[in-house]
Amino acid sequence: MYFSKIVSTGAYVPEKIVTNDDLSKIVDTNDEWIVSRSGIKNRHFSEDENTSVLASKAAKEILKKINKDPKEIELIVVATVSGDYTTPSVACLVQAEIGAENALAFDVGAACSGFIFGLSVADKFIKTGVYSNAIVIGAEVLSKYLDFEDRGTCVLFADGAAGVYIERSEKGGILGEELGSDGGKGMSLTGGHSQVVNAFNGQKKEGKDFFLKMDGRVIFDFATRKAPKSITALLENAGITKDEIDFVLPHQANSRIVEVVSRKLKIPMDKFYMNMHEYGNTSSASIPIALNEMMEKGLIKEGNKMVMCGFGAGLTWGSMLVEF
Ligand code: COA
């Protein structure tokens, strides 16, 4: 059996930065409330670039760093819940844009756990010897789903894309995972059309049906219960102690969630990497954006072990143990 090693990372976020003060001009909120409840100060919103544009720019960045010919890419998985179209997939659009004509390309939809789920799927193709490499990207333009009259959601979510190039390896790389779903709580975070509207059923589209809606307390409770349990199970299954972990890279939803997870796990906060203050919650893009930032800052050394943990809509969660 093979392992999948992370060889390169890359990211792209839209240029436009929107501050908490900018938001307070269009919705009844303020910087103090947003920072104290979420840790978020700024976020990037796309002006005209859709999800596949962000994802393609991230993919080009990933390949440029290792001077890799796109024609050699065998698999492209894009994790997203905000694709440009229902079809074609964002992954197929990325394939065309970067010229990865020999790759298999498809999307995975698991919201804020999406990057972990996508990496897990790609890892299986590599582990079983079907492919020897893959690009996995998390990409979202969530601003197009935001209701800027709903202060409970529009201050939290944002746009961005990032990902990794993984390659077959004899050791190291992805060492373990713990993934799960709880569809029973799915309606506590929804987005997109729920109505069946057609020319023959007499239904009319309702204006706000499209937007993200969230029961923040249910999600907070879910994340602070599930993430520690998932990470504990992951480490137990891998036979690794908390002390052997160099970094925990959580989904960048909310600094208060991360603080509770740190306390429950008894893993000190200085092992947790956070950058939601600059990017907001970019759902499936948040973990790879942070990972790329850590790489570019030179924080991760060969042999370091990291736990990545995503959680969110579905509801879904996923933890993964990676050795660099
Ligand atoms: N600015 C100012 N006030 C706001 C606000 C905003 N952006 N959003 C909500 N409020 C108000 C509410 O209307 C409410 O006012 P009221 O008491 O007069 O009714 C008050 O703040 C408290 O609202 P509540 O929803 O109870 O706040 P909270 O302390 O639970 O914090 C969240 C709300 C969303 C920050 C919190 O529930 C949370 O972090 N949930 C997890 C969200 C998340 O990370 N989701 C993504 C996971 S992938």
Image (tube, rainbow, N blue to C red):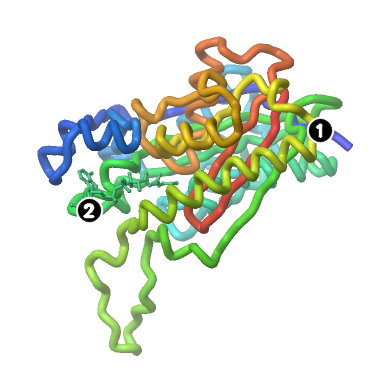
Other-residue count near label 2 (Cα within 10 Å), few / some / many at <14 / 14–19 / ≥20: some
Q: Is residue 65 visible?
A: yes
Q: Is residue 225 left or right of residue 5?
A: left
Q: Secondary structure at mark 2?
A: loop
Q: Which mark is residue 150?
A: 2
Q: Residue at x 66, y 33 (%)?
A: 71
Q: Which mark is residue 10?
A: none
The numbered mark, 1 or 2, whose residue comes first in the sequence reads 2
Vertical relation: 4 (above or below) 313: above
Residue that sits furthest to the left in the current view: 25
- Quick one: quadrant of the C terminus? top right
Q: Position of residue 303 (x, y in %)?
A: 73, 16
The answer to whether the residue bearing label 2 lies less than 8 angstroms from the nearest atom of ligand 1 is no
- Quick one: quadrant of the N terminus? top right
Q: Is residue 230 left or right of residue 14?
A: right
Q: How many marks?
A: 2
Vertical relation: 290 (above or below) 146: above
Amino acid on which the number 1 mark rests in the picture: Gly
- Quadrant for residue 18, please give it: top left
Q: Residue at x 53, y 36 (%)?
A: 261
Alpha-carbon span between mark 1 and mark 2: 44 Å
Q: Nearer the viewer, residue 90 or 41?
A: 41
Q: Nearer the viewer, residue 166 or 286?
A: 286
Amino acid on which the number 2 mark rests in the picture: Asp
Q: Residue at x 34, y 26 (%)?
A: 278
Q: Is residue 280 left or right of residue 93?
A: left
- Quadrant for residue 29, please give it: top left
Q: Position of residue 237 (x, y in %)?
A: 79, 40
Q: Secondary structure at mark 1?
A: loop
Q: Is residue 54 visible?
A: no
Which residue corresponds to mark 1? Answer: 239
